[in-house]
Amino acid sequence: MYTILVVDDEAKIRMLIRKYAEFEGNLVREAENGMQAVEMVRKEPHAFDIIVMDVMMPELDGFSAVSEIRKVSQVPVLMLSARGEEYDKIHGFELGIDDYVVKPFSPKELMMRVNAILKRSQPAKEAVVQHDILQFEGLMIDFTGRIVTVDGKRADLSPKEYDLLFYMAKNKDIALTREKLISNVWGYDFYGDDRTLDTHIKLLRKSLGPYSKFIVTLRGVGYRFEV
């Protein structure tokens, strides 16, 4: 059982998400706006396994709320928005959110995404004694420590950038289709919206600096981590 914080100023939306989340055996708590959500997390920074956060809300919008929450907690966040512009998605991912869902949405798909995030975010049950590390020129990827350094300086990647880089690096020199990347990195079936993938590739390349050259675009297919 997981504890999910649902933040939305629309009671109907909160009720819909609660219905499906509780059906799967989860505990749901609610907040009507970003300000209330921030206060709840500040009081109990480890109380929630994931936050489903709307963007447009009174008092404090979702982006500002996530920014404040990140000061005290790294709890996974899935953003909800009636806006699907790339700028909004990029802004959210730069803040460290894990996924972005555009309204109107399918409750079943939403829970599928929530479960995929929760599955990835759970710590490994068995400790790994030896670190799994790959080095490509000045790019060092520590899978065990979840650390990436660029020319000796630690790169500040979002959770999804880590997941994407780790998967691509472990499958280096292999052509990876968009469908395969989304299925394996996001953990759910491909639904045709590949803008999320392209946005993360763009952010990842920016984070890798000179080593963005390792991420090669395969026109009409997907990407390849080529060394």
Image (cartoon, rainbow, N blue to C red):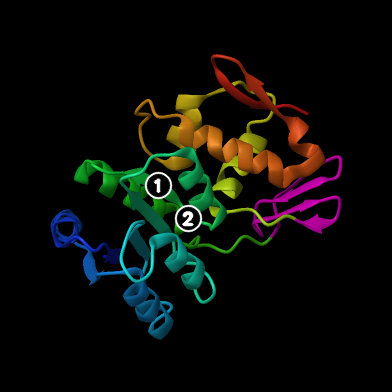
172 displayed left or right of 136:
left
Q: Residue furthest top?
A: 220
Q: Position of residue 121 (x, y in %)?
A: 46, 58
Specify the quadrant of the image occupied by residue 214. top right
175 displayed left or right of 57:
right
Q: Residue at x 54, y 58 (%)?
A: 95
5 displayed left or right of 220:
left
The label number, if any, that marks residue 216 in the structure image: none
Q: CA distance from mark 1 to mark 2?
A: 8 Å
Specify the quadrant of the image occupied by residue 187. top left
Q: Residue at x 35, y 32 (%)?
A: 189
Q: Which residue is mark 2?
A: 97
Q: Residue at x 62, y 35 (%)?
A: 168
Q: Amino acid at mark 1?
A: Tyr
Which image quarter is the C terminus in? top right
Q: Position of residue 98 (x, y in %)?
A: 46, 52
The label number, if any, that marks residue 100 in the structure image: 1
**Do the numbered discs 1 and 2 sit on residues whose CB atoms are within 8 Å?**
yes
